[in-house]
Amino acid sequence: MKPSATISEEAESYRRGVIFGLTMAEVLLLLIFCILLFLKITNDELKTANRNLVQAEEELFVQEQLNKALSDENQSLAVQVILSADGKVNNEFLETVFEEFVRLQATYPQKAEEFLSALDENPDLINELQLSTVDEWEELTTVAQYSVSKHEAAVLSKLNPDQRETFFMNADIASQFSAEEIRKFREVTLQLATPTTLTPAGNNWPPIISLSEAKDYSFTVGSAKLTEEFQAALSNEISEQILGILEEYDADVIEVIGHTDPQRMRSTRTTNLDDVSVSDLQDENDIVFRANDNAGLGYARALSVTRELMKVPNLQGYSILPYSAAQMISPADEINLSPETYDPTQLRRIEIRVRRRQ
């Protein structure tokens, strides 16, 4: 008969089925518990995510309803504007008023309320506001809404989003300083930016705007009266060109020089330049300047152009000075010793120069 195993041998065989002091059955139970715990955590996270999604959808729905309510209110207010106008107001103009009013209500509610109050006080307000074209109304509302000039609005509209953000950020910083502090800062900046080596002076002079009769910038024969075409050009593209040069060169003085051909004028002509040059320069009745020689005619024409430029809103604040060169200076900026070299229409011209006040 084979002897039975000893107690030590039995203990050793028992230990062979133990992991970290736990039996295989205990390890299996622990593993199942960990899996169940992981599933529980995952389930809780899914429930939380679902609740957040539902909450977000509810908030979005509430916001959409609020936006719709605001939109309905805006339209209701705008309808009041349209209903206040009688049949004399153009339909296209009314549509523009409607669109602009809704936009104004969304951006500046207080301004819209003020407009409605004015409408209540004066039912004919819409009819009185009606302009010749819809474009004029859009331009008027844009300029009024943002309190900028037409030129400034055009500059802002050309900026891309990054440039616009930089512009308004700098504007916000600049608003914290006085005009004098900004001027001094600009001077210091320009001095720091100036290279140590001198550049030829010719590269730094502003360009001269030459408006010759050869280019259809003319006056009535023998007088200082502007043609309608010349007058319209001065008020639009020419004044915009002058403004661009003024800003580019930081200038503040505009010089208008009148040039004539050498043909002598009749001795019977009279002049009123001594009497009206200064007092009637801004006369709304546009008094006619008269001269009895070429020096006076050049001056009279410079006065007429000066008076027209002084009416341009964007040139307000700049000094505009009239001069006469008569027939003395050629288009090549030389003493005109040989007038026959040039066509008379080239000699009869207005030159506009800008400079900085000393």
Image: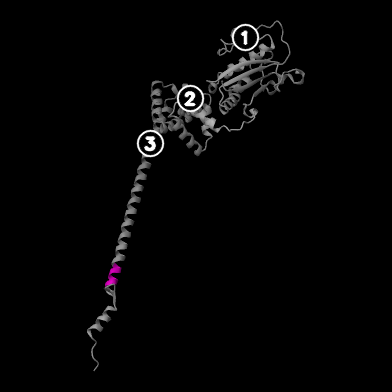
**For marks 1 and 2 on the same chain, the one whose residue lies earlier in the sequence:** 2
Q: Earlier in the sequence, mark 3 or mark 2?
A: 3
**Crowd rating for badge 2 (residues with CA inside 10 Å; few <14, some 14–19, many 20+):** some
Q: Which residue is mark 3?
A: 70
Q: Name the main secondary structure of what is drawn in magenta.
A: helix
Tell me the residue that label 2 is attached to. 89
Amino acid at the residue labelled 1: Leu
* Label 3 secondary element: helix
Q: Residue 10: give x, y in percent of width and height.
A: 25, 83
Element marked by disc 2: loop
Front-lying residue, 144 or 175:
175
Q: Which residues are magenta?
A: 26-32
Along the horizontal axis of the image, is 85 left or right of 247? left
Q: Position of residue 44 (x, y in %)?
A: 31, 57
Q: In x, y percent, where is residue 258?
A: 65, 17
Q: Position of residue 347 (x, y in %)?
A: 71, 19
Disc 1 crowd rating (10 Å Cα; few below 14, some 14-19, many 20+) is: some
Neighbor class of circle 3 (other Cα within 10 Å; few <14, some 14-19, many 20+) is some
